[in-house]
Image (cartoon, helix red, strand yellow):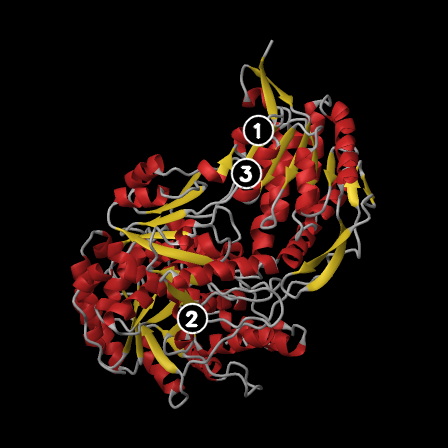
Amino acid sequence: MATVEALPLEIVDRIGGAVDQVGAEERAASLSRRSIKKDSKLWALDLAIRCCDLTTLEGSDSPGKVRQLASKAIRPAPGDPSIPHVAALCVYPNLVPTAAEALRGSGVKVASVATGFPSGQMPLELRLEEIERASDAGADEIDIVISRGLFLAGDERSVFDEVASSKKAAGEAHVKAILETGELGSYDRIRRAALVAMAAGADTIKTSTGKVSPASTLPAALVMTEAIRDFEEYGGRAVGLKVAGGIRTAKDAIRYLVIVHETLGDDWLTPDRFRIGASSLLNDLLMQIDFQRNGFYSDPDRYTLD
Amino acid sequence: MAGRWSYSPAPESTEIASVRDTYGLFIGGEFVEPLSGDYLKTINPATEEVLSAIPIAGDQDIDRAVAAARKAFAKWSRLDPSQRAKYLFRIARVIQERSRELAVLESMNGGKPIKESRDVDVPLVAAHFFYHAGWADKLEYAFPGHEAKPLGVAGQVIPWNFPLLMLAWKIAPALATGNTVVLKPAETTPLTALTFAEICLQADLPPGVVNIVTGAGPTGAALVRHPDVDKVAFTGSTEVGKEIQKAIAGTSKKLTLELGGKAANVIFDDAPLDQAVEGIVNGIFFNQGHVCCAGSRLLVQESIATRLIDKLKRRLSTLRLGDPLDKNTDIGAINSRDQLEKIRRLVGIGVEEGAELYQAECDIPERGFWFPPTVFTGVSQSHRIAQEEIFGPVLSVMTFRTPEEAVEKANNTPYGLSAGVWTEKGSRILWMADRLRAGVVWANTFNRFDPGSPFGGYKESGFGREGGRHGLESYVSLEPSR
């Protein structure tokens, strides 16, 4: 991963821009009515698997659970070699060594949440140390949370500095900055937070932790794709998007793909630039692929739980 | 590496819509052969396939239809208003039940994308009947202190851009207020009106309350001139509107005209740009720009002009032109060969006048009538493409520097049907709305319709209002209550 330099915070003001709530929601709703059929659907389902960050972020997670999920991440459908592996397995920092060992050589990345996930309410030094430890333990990707409290209090400078420090602490690891859109209160602020995180050097911006309701929504993702597009125009760097939280069905996943496709274009339809964080989506994707191929639904028990 | 994602065809099935080989005129509650003996062929503009043969009503047919409406008026106008409401509610419900069929027919016969006929046209049609059904027995509250009496027989002539919606705008208020109607749909798009006639039968509407006569210009002219027509309502071109006004001058006929437009869509530098781009697209490319209130003149503040045009061009590249029945189609077919030629001619004039042409790259189907989304930049007020209604997917872009200049330019047109204002500043929206001479001013949106909101024009865009309480007024004579 190439080193990313932070751009000055001033670029956020230069790009600027407002979001009209009614218009953004209308556009997202209209894109969600695209009818994706046949070959184009199979293509999308395959892509959704390749872009999937298979996730487990529970207090009850154990090394055994992570090893099982790692095997699912590598071979989502054990009997079917045409099914690709997912993009990454996303776990808490404690479980990074287990995940790294289980995934070695598979092509599936190890992603770790860090920075006092999900609230981020921890001293900065501890958050940065958590990033370093996760990275040292073998995480290829770090999902950090921005300080929503600072942001809502108007302290964009501190948010910017924190994300920049996190990026530095992550070293070679890919940094995904979680905006937690459900806590930001308006699309204007989602756009603004997205721009601040990108300016500070985030490789990917991510909608939600999945621990706050509402989690990812189509209009929030739309507003973030528009910010990514504008940032590329001004800053010359392509930033990825990750949507996470509440995405359980193939239909939901395809709706996000349509938004990315029609706002950012084909260049973003790759795991390098688009991710879906989900714990239970994968089996529905597999089931829909079988349905497209065979014309009927198979018994849910034909798909392994983890 | 990223791949290319192209959506597979997703056509709406046409099985639900049964089109007969030939239709009759709907007069006195039944389909009858035309006394004229003449028929015209109606086609699918996306394929040029002939769909059906439609009668051309001659003078004698118009006589018959007006007589049937006159006969029905005696009873219908005296019917208990709550009974009139009952019929209108019934019609509204049948429209909802048959909504898919109506949407498919509308797209087959008119060329508009199924997503528009399905999500916009037909739901608004049902809403219009529901809304007016509600007024039927409450007219005393619409006009306090007055008694609202029906006018008699209404002769109504509608255009081809929103065939069923314009029918609803005409028929629903007329019936709610106790009038009977003879309606002529446009020459190129008669099928949904004829299906509406079937719906009237299904709803048990008394014979003669609604009569549908098909044909071309001469049929419409005969209808509006007919001596026993009390009220004329026309939606269409300013040219024909003027002819109608001349033809009925000196008679006691009441008249409302909803005519052309050249709406300004004004974008200020603080506007939410991505949503403004959607508003511009919806303003001029909705229904291939066959919209009288289309935002065909884009007035953009100079400081953001380059950025906005770049965004607009990028957005244009994602518009999907093609089969109107495909659920993913954004831009359908041009309604007729004549209209396509008119658009081509005016676009040619725009190029000659020196405006800069930009057209989205898209594959144009071999058969049918198509025109790609088109944007002219560097347009001057004096260019014909800034003055004349093109009625196609063609946008003329001009810039302004101050709000005063925006108002001056927006109002500098013979028309005055609609306008749009895009800004985050609420006070500026109100300031603009006070000064724009247009019947409808949209703020941070465009081409939004609601049966409760009156619609109509200033200047050469016509007079009278449709929709809302104001729309009812066009179909009644008011006398002080006793």
Q: x, y (%) of residue B184?
A: 68, 42
Chain letter of the residue carrying label 2: A
Q: Are marks 2 and 3 in contact (CB under 8 Å)?
A: no
Q: x, y (%) of residue B470?
A: 52, 29
Q: Which mark is residue B474?
A: 1
Q: Is residue B95 visible?
A: yes
Chain letter of the residue carrying label 1: B
Nearest to viewer (mark 2 / mark 3): 3
Residue at left offset 50%, top offset 56% = B392
Residue at mark 2 to residue at mark 1: CA–CA distance:
56 Å
Q: Are marks 1 and 3 in contact (CB under 8 Å)?
A: no
> In the image shown, does B44 or A296 lie closer to the viewer?
B44
Nearest to viewer (mark 1 / mark 3): 3
Residue at left offset 50%, top offset 73% = A282
- Above/below status of A242 relative to B134: below
Quadrant housing the N terminus of chain B: bottom left
Q: Quadrant of residue B50?
A: bottom right
Amino acid type for the residue under numbered disc 2: Ile
Asked if badges 2 and 3 are on one and the same chain, I answer: no
Amino acid type for the residue under numbered disc 1: Ser
Chain letter of the residue carrying label 3: B
Residue at mark 1 to residue at mark 3: CA–CA distance:
18 Å
